[in-house]
Amino acid sequence: MRTKIIYLLLVGSLLLLCHVVRGQSAVPTTGKVITTTDGKGLPGATIKFVNTRTNQKTEIAANQEGIFNVNNLSAAEVYNIYVHHIGYQSDSILNFTVSANKNNSVLVRLKPDATSIDEVVVIGYGTALKKDLTGAISTMDGKDVATRKTTQLSQALQGAIPGVMVTRGS
């Protein structure tokens, strides 16, 4: 009976120790997103890490120099990394293994997208390509907004484009 109690205490302690070690295995990973044309950093690029075993996702954005830091990746885990930025082709790094005793750094080069930014339309709740829209599209130049003597953008847009109703929340 006494041996069983000691055995259960040892197994319980071992499980607790494994849980504590597993919880402290977060490894910092750094990286940079640059352009293929001039090698400059891309601020605001979105980087998504997806754990291939658990499908857990971590999404971050690059800073003004295109540099990103993520601190919650687990050691010895394999991740797929997906990077995108408006005006550039998306890129991915598959099967990136995070190592506990190594410098985990990533360099991603994004190519400019052949699709012209003129073909992207902002539609109030997202973006769409012009070819995918079925309704009418109206445009208003920034100069037209500037000539209207108002302090609110919503007031400048009101009545400027046919069929557009502008409402302001408080």
Image (spheres, rainbow, N blue to C red):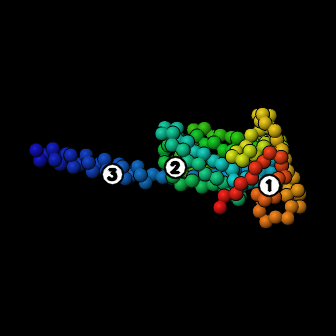
Q: Residue at x 61, y 51 (%)?
A: 60
The amino acid at mark 1 is: Gln
Q: Secondary structure at mark 1?
A: loop
Residue 49, which numbered label?
A: none
Indicate the quadrant where residue 120 lies: top right
Give the class, few, some or many, for how many residues have Cα within 10 Å of label 3's Cα (few <14, many ≥20).
few
Marks 2/1: CA–CA distance: 48 Å
The amino acid at mark 2 is: Leu
The amino acid at mark 3 is: Leu
Q: List the residue tagged with mark 2.
A: 73
Q: Could one spot residue 127 in this view of the protein? A: yes
**Sequence-wise, which precedes: disc 1 or disc 3?**
3
Which quadrant is home to the N terminus?
top left
**Sequence-wise, which precedes: disc 2 or disc 3?**
3
Residue 95 placement (x, y as % from top left): 57, 38
Q: Secondary structure at mark 3?
A: helix
| 1 vs 3, front mark | 1
Query: How many marks can you see?
Result: 3
Give the class, few, some or many, for how many residues have Cα within 10 Å of label 2's Cα (few <14, many ≥20).
many
Of 11 and 112, the residue lying toward us: 112
Indicate the quadrant where residue 168 lies: bottom right
Q: List the residue tagged with mark 3.
A: 17
Residue 70 vs 79, above or below: the answer is: below
Of 39 and 84, the residue lying toward us: 84
Residue 17 placement (x, y as % from top left): 33, 51
Residue 158, which numbered label?
A: 1
Residue 91 placement (x, y as % from top left): 69, 40
| 2 vs 1, front mark | 1
Residues at circles 1 and 3 in contact by the CB criterion of under 8 Å = no
Marks 2/3: CA–CA distance: 20 Å
Residues at circles 2 and 3 in contact by the CB criterion of under 8 Å = no
Q: Residue at x 78, y 43 (%)?
A: 121
